[in-house]
Image (cartoon, coloured by chain):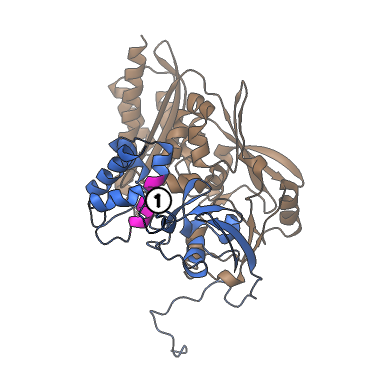
Amino acid sequence: MRGDVPACAVAVPASLEEALGLLGREPGRWRPLAGGTDLMVPFAAGRLPDTRFLSLQRLDALRAVEADEEGVTIGALATYTQVRLHPLVQRHLPNLVRSALATGAVAIQNRGTLGGNLVNGSPAADTPPSLLAYGARVELTSLRGARWVPYEAFHTGYKQTVMAADELLTRIRVPRPGEGFHFYRKVGTRAAQAVSKVCLAAFVRVADGVVRELRIGLGSVAPVPCRARSAEAAVLGRSLDAAVLETARSALQADIQPIDDIRSTAHYRRTVAGNVLVQMLTDLNAWINLRK
Amino acid sequence: MGNPGRFDRDPAPVPGANAPTVAKMSLNLTVNGTPRSVEVFPMARLLDVLREDLGLPGTKEGCGEGECGACSVIMDGQLVNTCLVPAVQAQGADLLTIEGLARDGTLGGLQRSFLLCNGAQCGFCSPGMVLAAEDLLRRCPCPDEAEIRTALAGNICRCTGYVKIIDAVRAAGEARP
């Protein structure tokens, strides 16, 4: 344990207003702390510069998961366990359930929060590809007011986001995708606990055998979680045959900028991202054929 | 070269090392059914509070970064890694640690099952492993092998190869009333 425990103060606001007030008065001074599953690791290793933490543990309003006709709204403090066990998430957002199950293992899922997973800003996080595939938005709140930002525009660079220093991420809104094909695949060293080498989620709507709507979210292959725009364009408006699959596989290479690091190599990630994309399209084709 | 007494292998200076010391907080917990209160720093790890302040060294530190599960306890009915829980977030919590499973010197059912099935070798992972299994059996009284493997996926054992641990959990599930 190399973190400087005696030097660290923690504020525990009883309400969102109180938390935002503190952030507004001293922007950048207080580091928000949700479930701690990400922050406690660098903290204990002495690699976190912060000595003032804003624990969000009493903000129970931000734990709610609610649904209406248009979509599901998930409080930023909802844990992976809450998300994956929620009946409406299970019914409408199966990729998000699979993302939550793919994150850590039981003990991490019980503490880690969906909002924390996004704000932490890791390109290897397991829920972002699903949120990209579903076209989610995030609510950023400060004393100045609340604004909704497309999740796709949330990350601006490695561990950088559009959040201002006085803002908290308060809710995640996922539109109901409706009838369609859902796909999620994480590739890591093992099923549990591993950090992804490649992660891909997709939602696809099909009419008359033709792909009409398609969003593909990717993790661990760029400085930020990102959409596979070129691969999507290669498939949109088409029926799937072997040529389209190979065109999409090639197009995907323009969507990603993987690196060599301790978990994998850029070459492996490029190859496997293409393979997982083709697996997704092959499964999609089978799904289309079953429904004919 | 201008830094006498400091060697390459010395730890790097800790961020905030010169910052003033903050006040300790009164942390009130229920530990294995008994109310306890200790004065601790708010960012102390629950793992260290258990081992050093509460005198309960049954909870082990393995990796210290949420990967190995050796420090698992049940907090308010949920399995957690105590190395990742700051003390301040455990205020008012109800904790079950490995010390709470035996009663009056008699081992709990899961502990007996680990003994009978040889589910421990060096034993270092056992406290966390047993609590992860306890958490599973509370949620799912008669688990199949896949459910056991998923529930224990966050707990690493470098000795047994897991087969005997899985046998122990299955047997304990079958033996529960």
Figure check: A112 above or below A64: below
Residue that appears at 26% across and 62% down = B122
Please state if A72 lies on the left or on the right of B67 as rendered.
Answer: right
Residue A25: x and y in percent read 76, 58
Which chain gets the brown colouring? A
Front in this rendered view, residue B53 or A223: B53
Quarter holding the C terminus of chain A?
top left
| Residue type at tag 1 | Leu
Question: Which residue is disc 1 drawn over?
Answer: B131
Residue, far front: B104
Please state if A148 lies on the left or on the right of B62 as rendered.
Answer: right
Figure check: A246 above or below B74: above
Q: Residue A246 occupies which quadrant of the picture?
A: top left
Q: Magenta stretch containing residue B127, yes or no?
A: yes
Tell me if mark 1 has few (under 14), some (14-19) or many (20+) residues whose alpha carbon lies within 10 angstroms of its own.
Answer: many
Front in this rendered view, residue A164 or A178: A178
Whether residue A168 is visible to the viewer of this picture, yes or no, is: yes
Residue that appears at 60% across and 78% down = B18
Residue A101: x and y in percent read 42, 38
Q: Magenta stretch containing residue A236, yes or no?
A: no
Residue B102: x and y in percent read 39, 55
State which region is magenta.
Answer: B125-134
Residue that appears at 49% across and 57% down = B84
Which chain gets the blue colouring? B
Figure check: A151 above or below B59: above
Whether residue A221 is visible to the viewer of this picture, yes or no, is: no
Majority secondary structure of magenta residues: helix
Residue A168: x and y in percent read 66, 48
